[in-house]
Amino acid sequence: MPVFRCKMCGGALDVPPGASIVQCGYCDSAQTLPRLDDERRANMYDRASHYRRANDFDKALAIYEQVLNADPSDAEAYWSLVLCRYGIEYVEDPQTHKRVPTINRMQYGSILADPDYTSAIGHADDAQRELYKAEAAAIDALQKGILEISGKEEPFDVFICYKETDERGRRTPDSVLATDLYHQLTQEGFKVFFSRITLEDKLGSAYEPYIFAALNSARVMIALGTRPEYFNAPWVKNEWSRFLALIRSGKNKALIPAYRDMDPYDLPEAFSHLQAQDMSKLGFMQDLIRGIKKILGASAAPAAKAAAAQPQVAAFQPAAPLLERAFMFLEDGEWKKADEFCERVLNLEPRNARAYLGKLLAELKVTNLDELKNCGDSFENSNNYKKCRRFADDSLARRLESYLQAISNKKEIEQRQTMERLARLERERKKAERNKVIKGILIAVLLVCALRACSSYDSQEKVSREEISQAKTAQEKVSQAEPAEKRVAQSNEAVPQEKIVQEKMTQGKASQEKIAQKKVSQEKPAEKKGVQSEKRKAGFRKGDFSGAAIGDVIPFGRYEQDNNADNGKEPVEWVVLARNDKRILVISRYGLDSKPYHTKHTSVTWETCSLRQWLNTRFYRAAFSSAEQKRIFRAKVTADKNPGYRTPSGNDTADKVFLLSIQEAEKLFGSNSARQCRATAYARAQGAYTAGFPWWLRSPGDSGYNAAGVDTLGGVRSFGFSVNNVSFAVRPALWINL
């Protein structure tokens, strides 16, 4: 087994068996550990850690992705992806001699909102989770400091990317060529980022804020070199790969490779689609300058000249400072200004999810993201929310969905409390009426007793008749008031008992003996019905579903449910949703597994999603015997459109196992509570949410990247959830031949 090394200093770690955290004996740093359950994965971790410590983050990131493909629940692999994405390097603090993180690949998005970070937190044990949170908090503080510095930097036109020194610390030929290029471009009036000069008055530990600001503001990067290994040096590659990533994300930028004294075919593979320039070619400088002017725009003055003439450079200003100003205005309650600054961000970056989030906060007049959950009404139909949801990463999307869920929960609780209050008031009113009637009876009885004591026998006899008449009248009123109270307080009583109460109301003068006889006569059929139900259940256990009615629960097939493989699979229970003369439509009573609608975050339909393939292959073969498979009808599954959004829904399919559509889920279940379900222990172990159990529908959401589902309270969410969400339960549906 390979030696696992410290992620901070690279020293060999002494790892106890089964440990998830360990203390390094060299740098005394506490750190998390991966699950090293086989030698191949241990070797992959060893290679990836080597690349990451050498600041070759792209190579390390590719290996960690392979680790996750083998085990999607490895928390340490998710955390390692975060370290690579932000270019985290651990250096020794000269004062405390502890290892502290530095950022070499600054990102606008906070590490706390990174989807891989949230995945690491979700899959970690308690000890790992605390360390991840502590490290992420330190990195988040660094990010804020870098953004504060970079936001004050003026924009650049051109970024020169090159290798300054060789392996012996001597100045490279690339540095000399870059210096000449810098002076030529500066004379032409361009604002040029050239680290040898631009960073000469900056501390070494503070380079990243200025590099980050320059990479984001520069419209053109010139990556020059004289040797292939210089282009692939970690720090050089760190700069041009980040610039290429900005281009791939839709930014209006251009990268120009420039080489000398080497074969152009030895340039990095990532440059294969770019037009490289030979610096030894006559007229190279003139061609380069003309090309840069063309990219920046013939009418646009370079940054240095524009600054002297008029503030044209604002067009190339990065969006982050504007967005930061917008959220400051939100904190101060200046909704109009916040909305204006968000609009300015969207002019630069039309797909900026946080800008749409800022507009949503201004629209709802709330100061920060967390206050959304306190909104009185749902913001689901807001156009700003829909745009934000469309362009948001998984972490922000889940957060917004949780706030909508919180608002929905609060609404339902308020409605339930209102209904309970009204019912309580109604019970109190009925009770007051009954007490009033009883009080009248007591007064009448006392009056009779008083009259008997002071009247003759004849008078007593007359009063006695009046007393009896009044008492009977009062008794009838009590018998009418009391069942009404019982009907409010005991609305869930059995049907025979309700019928008896109704007879009491209509036959107030009937004797209690006759009413009791009717009660007995009505309970006997119920006993007989119970016997028939047991007979039907016995038939169900034998596979005879001919007597199955809508709402019945039948056993069919077997699937792992208690998460104990040693005792074998458990029978699957199905709820009958519909039937005809030939077959019945059923859906699993519980969420049987936890699967994404599709394995990748891309635009799909039911026809093309991975969940459909899994249900009709692996699940179908695992859950049903060959005899049971013959009883399952291959049904035409319609590509029902989303009733609220014009999202393409694909083509109709023919499936044995499928999911319900939005329309079917709303039609076949009578209420939200009927749509609620629990997930099995096995499904929870596979990642299903434990706080309520949302489950997938086959209809598309508000875009092909989302699929509709049923939320934890049983509500149908037509806008959908991210198709690669791994925490939704699966409730298969199928038609069984009778």
Image (cartoon, rainbow, N blue to C red):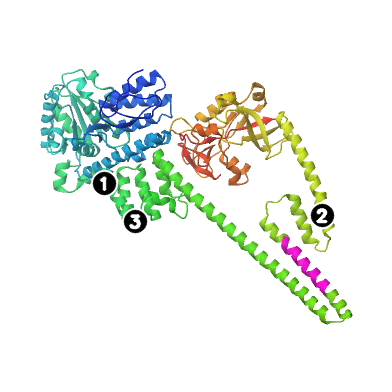
Q: Amino acid at mark 1?
A: Pro
CA gap, disc 3 to disc 2?
Answer: 70 Å
Give the mark nearest the N terminus, 3 or 1. Answer: 1
Left or right relative to 82: residue 638: right
Are the residues flagged by discs 3 and 2 in contact, CB closer than 8 Å?
A: no
Q: Is residue 545 visible?
A: no
Q: Which residues are magenta?
A: 467-482
Look at mark 2 in the image and give the residue it sits on. Answer: 516
Q: Amino acid at mark 3?
A: Trp
Within the image, what quadrant is residue 543 found in? Answer: top right
Give residue 335's mark.
Answer: 3
The kind of secondary structure the magenta stretch mainly shows is helix
Left or right relative to 60: residue 587: right
Give the mark nearest the N terminus, 3 or 2. Answer: 3
Q: State the residue at coordinates (66%, 57%).
A: 489
Please say if 621 is above or below 219: above
Within the image, what quadrant is residue 281 found in? Answer: top left
Are the residues flagged by discs 1 and 2 in contact, CB closer than 8 Å?
A: no
Q: State the residue at coordinates (33%, 33%).
A: 82
- In the foreground, 410 or 659: 410
CA gap, disc 1 to disc 2?
Answer: 81 Å
Residue 218 drawn at (x, y percent):
22, 37
Residue 21 drawn at (x, y percent):
36, 30
Residue 328 drawn at (x, y percent):
29, 52
